[in-house]
Image (cartoon, rainbow, N blue to C red):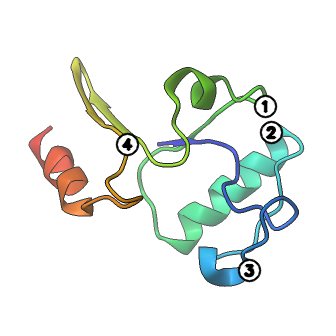
Amino acid sequence: MIYISEAHAIDVWPIGESAGTLNYKHKNIKDRSKCANKFMKTFDFNIPIFLDNMDEQFETETSAWPFRYFVTKGTKFHFIPNPYDSTYDIIELFDILKSI
């Protein structure tokens, strides 16, 4: 997983705890790392997390915001593009993860 900019930072787009957590906009890579670690602990997430750089290179080059899934393993690559009505059927992602 690649952790990109905070989607619902309370100092940028304050939607309260409806996002499930309260995080601030990442000012540096240490902030981003802290939020990624918080995510891993909160959701018992056991997949390695990589951090997008502070220039948002991955997010910009892949248009990863707001929702995009890129799944890779070895030479296999799967992409789930824009969501339908701003939602995904998460089963599609689970099916891809099981297949690789």
**Amino acid on which disc 3 is placed:** Gly
Q: Which residue is mark 4?
A: 82
Q: Are marks 2 and 1 in contact (CB under 8 Å)?
A: yes
Q: Earlier in the sequence, mark 4 or mark 1?
A: 1
Residue 13 seen: yes
Q: Earlier in the sequence, mark 2 or mark 1?
A: 2
| Distance Cα–Cα, label 3 vs label 4 | 25 Å
Q: Mark 1 touching mark 3, by CB under 8 A?
A: no
Q: Residue at x 70, y 53 (%)?
A: 6
- At a point 81% along the width and 68% down the height, the residue shown is 10
Eye-nearest disc, 1 or 3 = 3
- 71 displayed left or right of 54: left
Given residues 20 and 40, the one toward you in this image is: 20
Q: Which residue is mark 3?
A: 16
Give the residue displayed 41% in from the left and 50% down from the top. Answer: 47
Amino acid type, mark 1 = Met
Q: Earlier in the sequence, mark 3 or mark 4?
A: 3
Residue 29 numbered tag: 2
